[in-house]
Amino acid sequence: MSDLPAPPLRSVLDPRISLATALQAQPGVYALLLGSGTSTGAGVPTGWGVVTELVRKAAAAAKDDVPGDLDPESWWAENAGGQPLGYSALLSALAPTPAARRALLAGFFEPSDDDREQGRRVPGPAHQAIAALVARGSVRVIVTTNFDRLIEQALEAVGIMPQVIATPSAVAGMEPLTHARCTIIKLHGDYATLDQLNTVEELSTYSDEMTGLIDRVLDEYGVIVNGWSGDWDGALVRALEGTRSRRYPLYWSAYSNIGAAASHLIAQHHAQIIAGVTADQFFPDIVSRLDAIDALADPPPTLAMAISLLKRALPDPVRHIELRDLIDAQIGRIQDALAERPQTPPASDPQTLQDAHDSLRRASDTLLHLLAHGIYLDRDQQHTDLWVRTVEQLMRARRTPGGTYVQWWNNLQHYPALLALRVGVSVAVAAKHENVAIQLLHEPTWRPPFNPDSPKIALDALNEYDVLDPAFINQFPRWDGKVSAYPLSHLLKDTLRSILLPLLGDDDSYVRTFHRAEYRIALAHKLAPKAVGGFPCLASGEFISENQWYSQGRLIWEDDFRKSGDREAWGWTPVEDETTDGFSKKLTALTEELKHNRQLVRQ
């Protein structure tokens, strides 16, 4: 009697329907198993394809005839003293140094300018969709037999730095699979190393470390197979054969005919088959199905619930993925709001202008509250990289206009990022974490679409005068016709009050914190003058208005910084002779510039 489990009732629905619902209901439960078919659409050869082409080049260099059907193993056996043909042996013979090996392999895996122009050897639709699955938390483990780095590049493009396990020695020191945002297990190695597996003999066994890791994945996760035939990888086939009592279903996506090895595994595990689709069709389709399900999902948690979830996850190192997912969900909502905006404004009357700003503010509300509470309560600064990444993701959510567009409307896409930056800097100053404020100003980057070779830091890209239009803001109906000398500062202070008051306690404390943050942003501009353009009006705001100066002409907030600013964070090294204190002189010079700016506003 067979010891295989009884086959389930055959579904009358397309397997992609059950797969999408499973991924939505159980995020992180399914792992991907990717073969060469996932990357061939991007013009990347298989490992054996690289070996074959290198042998052909070696044969040509030996001045041998190179027929189209050259048998690489036979040629190698005749010319290499009987040594078995393998990736490692071949590379050692043709390129004995690491630099030589990388140069030899570059043409197979690294794109040329022409490749980039033609979309070859760069992350394709499949890789980008896989990155989207990881970004939404649907997939956290990727097992691949490929040598290329297209998955890693696609993940890095969306701000995810995966844990990559490409050698047996890396297994021992890896972060647990359940803790890592994404783990890529490269069973056959990486193209730039010498310890790859290529031949049938090499692929017949894995190291004990890799065997244990892959057995764990196959036991604890559902598996989605794509682009893998099973014809050559004996060790991986045996690993799948040994996984008889599966907790979760197996899905098998294939474009061409399924061979004997794959058919046996499919029958053993009663796998659901998605046939006749390429990787570039399969993965984007799954993402679109998940998006459709999300549109029907329950409404997002209330603000109070979201803050409660953040407070529970913040101090727990085991729940850092949950914290990131909470933030990412809100970033996604802002990205959706930006994507739904028309390319040109519907009208330019004052009410429409005010509504356009307010709609983006409402879309950002929950994220701004989470960011404020997160930075304020992150006493040990364990999550600063998450706060920096949040600002950066909002900066990069700005879409590139196509055709005719209106500049101020296009610039307004950075309004959520500007609000997030101002919240972060203000809260960091209030919590006496000025080093976090400095990181928020300097570490997030954005590449302007028409000048991508000159990335801008947040201090520069999110300058309020580059995001907002003061003339428009002074027309807002909410001001009842009262014109502000500093409309951008006035708008930001008014807009962020409801976000920061719950943390700071009273309005006086809020106003002091807001002015302290404005002064420190002006100081950051002063210390990095090359980062900004459009001076002098950049360093202005209500913190330099009439009532912010002592009778002697000293700015209140300069004195405040001299008394309570974090000198170490700002690089202000004490000196015995104040006349040689370069930092102090910069503070004095900044105040003089601010006086000049105030005079310009008066005129």
Image (cartoon, rainbow, N blue to C red):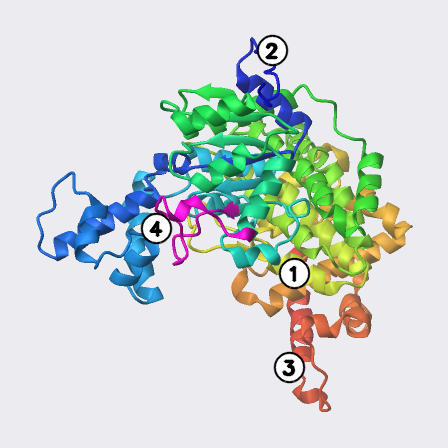
Which residue lies under the disc numbered 1? 439
The mark found on residue 110 in the picture is 4
Tag 4 secondary structure = loop
* Viewer-nearest residue: 183 or 354: 183
Residue type indicated by callout 3: Gly
Which residue lies under the disc numbered 2? 9
Which of the marked residues, 1 or 2, is nearer the chain's N terminus?
2
* Viewer-nearest residue: 136 or 575: 136
Determine whether, in the image, residue 278 is placed left or right of residue 239: left
Distance CA(mark 2)–CA(mark 4): 46 Å
- Residue range in magenta is 185-208
Residue type indicated by callout 4: Glu
**Residue 12 picture location, percent across and down:** 56, 8
The stretch drawn in magenta includes residue 128? no
Distance CA(mark 2)–CA(mark 3): 78 Å
Distance CA(mark 1)–CA(mark 2): 56 Å
Foreground label between 2 and 4: 2
Foreground label between 2 and 3: 2
Q: In this rendering, does residue 598 appear at all?
A: yes
Q: Residue at x 27, y 45 (%)?
A: 114
Tag 3 secondary structure = helix
Determine whether, in the image, residue 501 is placed left or right of residue 11: right
Which of the marked residues, 2 or 3, is nearer the chain's N terminus?
2
Count residues near mark 3 (Cα–Cα under 10 Å), then give few for <14, some for 14-19, many for 20+.
Answer: some
Which residue lies under the disc numbered 3? 582
Distance CA(mark 3)–CA(mark 4): 47 Å
Q: Residue at x 48, y 48 (%)?
A: 206
**Residue 521 picture location, percent across and down:** 67, 60
The stretch drawn in magenta includes residue 194? yes
Decide: is 200 above or below 559.
above
